[in-house]
Image (cartoon, helix red, strand yellow):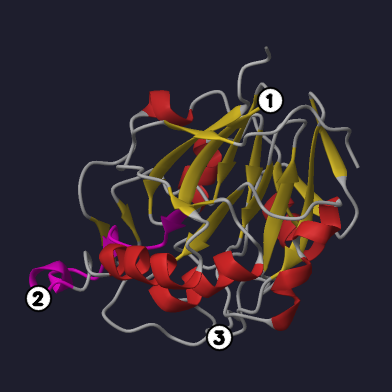
Amino acid sequence: MRPVPVVQVTWLGHSSVVLDIDGLRLVADPLLRSHNGPLRRRGPRPAPATWAGADAILLSHLHHDHAELRSLWMLAAAPVLTSLTNASWLCSRGLTGVGLGEEWHGLGSGVFARLVKAVHHSRPMPHRPNGAHGHLVRGPDALVWFAGDTSLYDEMTEIPGLAGDDGIDLAIVPIGGWGPRLSAGHMGPVEAATACAMTRARSALPVHWGTLHPPGMHLFGDWMDRPLPEFRSALAKTAPHCRLVPAPMGVPVSVPTGRGARPGP
């Protein structure tokens, strides 16, 4: 009997995630240092062993808490998969930017990636392009959705169908921010649970919480820790079929997909 297929995921804090899928290592929105401009990281920065050997980088948008140039340069051997306008800007900064669209892009080992919609138009930056999107990654054994920064939108229900599937194996969804209040274009715990229900996600990894803060702000209230129990409660009510992935920061977790090999797109 063939073993149950799994993917391995490692949360590095904030929106930084390492996905090991079908022999490839993908790193999403890498923030690998102890700070990002004025924002500070709670806890130690990610150990190099957790992110070394990346085959590609998935970059959702160019806000500084997702596209920190020094962290990207630490992974400079890997191509950065993002929108066309973002890719051009990254190339001008000495990185290998690869522009994706709504067509599947082969990464090797039967793994494909493409962009999906994200609604994140707040805080435009005059000095960087403002393209924002999520990623859909499909391998022989799993379908993974990196939501990126986004608010809810009706077409989320159509995301699994973009890969000819009836549901997402692993949804990587934001549930908080780097301050007590969320600005427009983000999901809190309740909205993230709704997104998991809309995409019929079988497992969910919550990100974009509990990591970054303005200097001293982490000392006031429990706002950094509150999103996780709120997401757990909302998921149980809204998407009871969806398993919460227990992923302590920096610890690899194996996520079963429960399916056999599938052809590529």
The answer to which image quadrant residue 143 occupies is top right
Residue under label 3, please give it: 122
Q: Residue at x 48, y 72 (%)?
A: 238
Amino acid type, residue under disc 1 in the picture: Asp
Report if residue 209 lies within the magenta region.
yes
Separation of residues labelled 3 and 2 (CA atoms)? 26 Å
Disc assigned to residue 22: 1
Amino acid type, residue under disc 3 in the picture: Ser
Residue under label 2, please give it: 220
- For the residue pair 108 and 70, the one nearer the viewer reads as 108
Q: Residue at x 72, y 52 (%)?
A: 136
- For the residue pair 169 and 83, the one nearer the viewer reads as 169
Disc assigned to residue 148: none
Separation of residues labelled 2 and 1 (CA atoms)? 43 Å
Q: What element carries label 2?
A: loop
Q: Is mark 1 on a helix, strand or loop?
A: loop
Quarter the N terminus occupies: top right
Residue 188 visible, this angle? no
Discs 2, 1 touching: Cβ within 8 Å: no
The magenta region covers: 205-222
Question: Is residue 114 shown left or right of residue 49?
Answer: right
Q: Give the class, few, some or many, for how many residues have Cα within 10 Å of label 3's Cα (few <14, many ≥20).
A: few
The answer to which image quadrant residue 234 occupies is bottom left
Mark 3 vs 1, N-terminal side: 1
